[in-house]
Image (tube, rainbow, N blue to C red):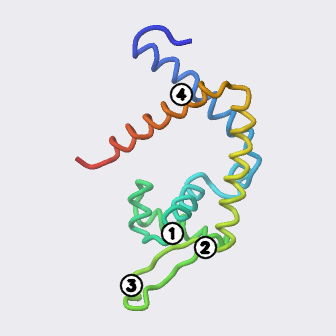
Amino acid sequence: MFHGSLSKFADQINELMPQVIQGFARRQANELYKGKITLPQFLILEFLSRKGESRMTDMARCMHVTTAAMTGMVERLVGYGYVERVYDLKDRRTIRIRLTPSGNSLIKKINEQRRRMVINIFGGIPENDRREYLKILTQVRENLIKEDSPL
């Protein structure tokens, strides 16, 4: 287990994280890791699943990419039939993006596969340790959100 300074902790995290991420990736036998969609495309689908319809500029801001880059990613997702453009009846310049039933189905399928994988991986870890792990991950997420927020 961990002993020592924050610097040593960082070294241990840097050693462990690639192995953990690689282990999770190997176990994900779904469309994402079979190359059907890329990780950024999956993140867009997941964003739309949570938010509903969204403007291209809002999605680009969330993903920290240009609107042009987001347009390219969305165009591929439209081609796959996972998302569609919705035009504002009052202002045709305003275009929103939303999941299609096929996109919704894909997100549900991937999330269920990820859920089963997590149950399998964490099944042998005591509940108290899982609870503590979740608490720490939540704190890490909060720190990341704070760093991403404008002052």
Name which of mark 4 and mark 3 comes first in the sequence. Answer: 3
Q: In the rendered structure, which amino acid carries the disc numbered 1? A: Gly
Name which of mark 2 and mark 4 comes first in the sequence. Answer: 2
The crowding category of the residue bearing disc 4, from other C-alpha atoms within 10 Å (few below 14, some 14 to 19, many at least 20), is: few
Whether residue 135 sits left or right of residue 147 in the image: it is right
Q: Which mark is residue 93?
A: 3
Depth check, mark 2 against mark 4: the one in front is 4
Q: Which residue is mark 2?
A: 78
> Would you say the residues marked 3 and 2 are in contact, meaning their CB atoms lie under 8 Å apart?
no
Q: Which residue is mark 1?
A: 52
User: Alpha-carbon distance for marks 1 and 4?
Assistant: 32 Å
The crowding category of the residue bearing disc 2, from other C-alpha atoms within 10 Å (few below 14, some 14 to 19, many at least 20), is: some
The quarter of the picture where residue 56 lies is bottom left
Give x and y (percent) for residue 32: 68, 52
> Would you say the residues marked 3 and 1 are in contact, meaning their CB atoms lie under 8 Å apart?
no
Give x and y (percent) for residue 150: 26, 49
In which quadrant of the rendered image does the N terminus lie?
top right
Whether residue 85 sits left or right of residue 127 in the image: it is left
Taking the view exactly as shown, the residue that stands out farthest to the bottom is 90
User: Alpha-carbon distance for marks 4 and 3?
Assistant: 48 Å
User: Alpha-carbon distance for marks 1 and 2?
Assistant: 16 Å
User: Of helix, strand and loop, which one carries label 2?
Assistant: helix
Name which of mark 3 and mark 2 comes first in the sequence. Answer: 2
User: Alpha-carbon distance for marks 2 and 4?
Assistant: 40 Å
Name which of mark 1 and mark 4 comes first in the sequence. Answer: 1
Depth check, mark 3 against mark 1: the one in front is 1
Give x and y (percent) for residue 79: 64, 73
User: Of helix, strand and loop, which one carries label 4?
Assistant: helix
Q: Which residue is mark 4?
A: 132
Q: In the rendered structure, which amino acid carries the disc numbered 3? A: Arg
